[in-house]
Amino acid sequence: MGDVKKGVWQMSLAMLISGSIGAFVLLSGLPVTEVVFWRCLIGAITLFVFIRISKQPFSPLTRITLLLAVLGGVALVVNWLLLFAAYERISIGLSTVVYNTQPFMLVMMGVLSGERVSRVKWGWLFLAFGGVIVLLSSELTHAHGSEWLSGIGLALGAAFFYALTAIITRRLKSIAPQHIAFIQVLTGAIALLPLAQLPGPGAGSPWPILLTLGIVHTGIMYQLLYSAIQKLPTPMTGSLSFIYPVVAIVVDNLVFGHSLSLTQLAGGVLILFAAAGNNLGWGEKKPRECGVGIKPTN
């Protein structure tokens, strides 16, 4: 019971941290590529320190597992680039709601690879699709421009690449999760190095925000997340992960004054409800893990 209680607070804290990342990204005032580069670099250093402190030996790597880990890192970084770009075009709250279509991207990828999907999961998939349609219908009732539609597209693209990251990660069961995360963010830092610039010091310097994104939102958040996953049953992990979109919507409203319209809120509720049913196995005769056992995080 002690481990479960510890896992609950670790998971809850990880989701609270993740829900605030969008505000830090926008408050940095930097281009998306620079934000992601510094998050990857500082996050990689932080994760390496945690791994060394825990004295956990690095998992043995073959050429195939290393290649898969690097490919997963590329997909994860593309996911961050697209999601952070979506924040700039629509809002953190709306981007997060659309981003939560990720579990269904994972289901569709499973279908394409030959996995059998139950009727119940198809039902949740169609409900989520209905939620996206309702969200898009707000384009017809409000004067949204091309930026709005491109933001929705970017958030959907981010969900796709997160699902791709999850698919790849599922093939790396022989490697400790912390080590996978370290390789992924290190890959991101190396890939984005040619585009990186050193922010200047002084008043208005983004360094406090970049350090927070790297240390807290990457190193500490992933450490808490993986520690919680090791202690909690999948249904509990899935239910606690819904703290993330709620916090993101609240933070977006408090910091930037953004709020969802009634139409967008209705679509968002459908998407999140469908994601909850899919992740928690509602309606299934036998509970099964879906995806990587967690909701998408930033």
Image: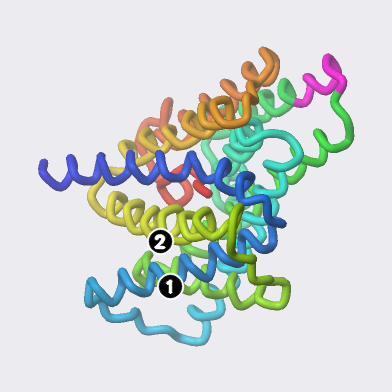
Could you say whether the residue bearing mark 2 is in a helix, strand or loop?
A: helix
Residue at left offset 70%, top offset 52%: 82
Magenta stretch: dominant secondary structure: helix
Residue at left offset 74%, top offset 46%: 154
**Furthest residue to the left?**
2
The reply to whether discs 1 and 2 touch (Cβ–Cβ < 8 Å) is: yes
Q: Position of residue 215 (x, y in %)?
A: 42, 60
Circle 1 sits on which residue?
A: 45
Which callout, 1 or 2, points at the residue further toward the start of the chain?
1
Q: Is residue 31 left or right of residue 229?
A: right
Q: Which quadrant is the N terminus positioned in? A: top left
Residue at left offset 24%, top offset 45%: 7
Q: Specify the quadrant of the image occupied by residue 32.
A: bottom right
Q: Residues within 10 Å of mark 1 (few under 14, many from 20)?
A: some
Query: Which segment is the magenta one?
Result: 136-143
- Indicate the amino acid at tag 1: Ile
Measured along the vertical axis of the image, is residue 1 above or below residue 284? below
Residue at left offset 78%, top offset 19%: 138
Q: Is residue 140 left or right of residue 136?
A: right
Which of 207 and 16 lies nearest the eye of the viewer? 207
Which of 39 and 131 lies nearest the eye of the viewer? 39
Circle 2 sits on which residue?
A: 219
Measured along the vertical axis of the image, is residue 144 above or below residue 205? above
**Furthest residue to the front?**
203
Label 1 and label 2: CA atoms lie apart by 8 Å
Which of 184 and 294 lies nearest the eye of the viewer? 184
- Indicate the amino acid at tag 2: Gly
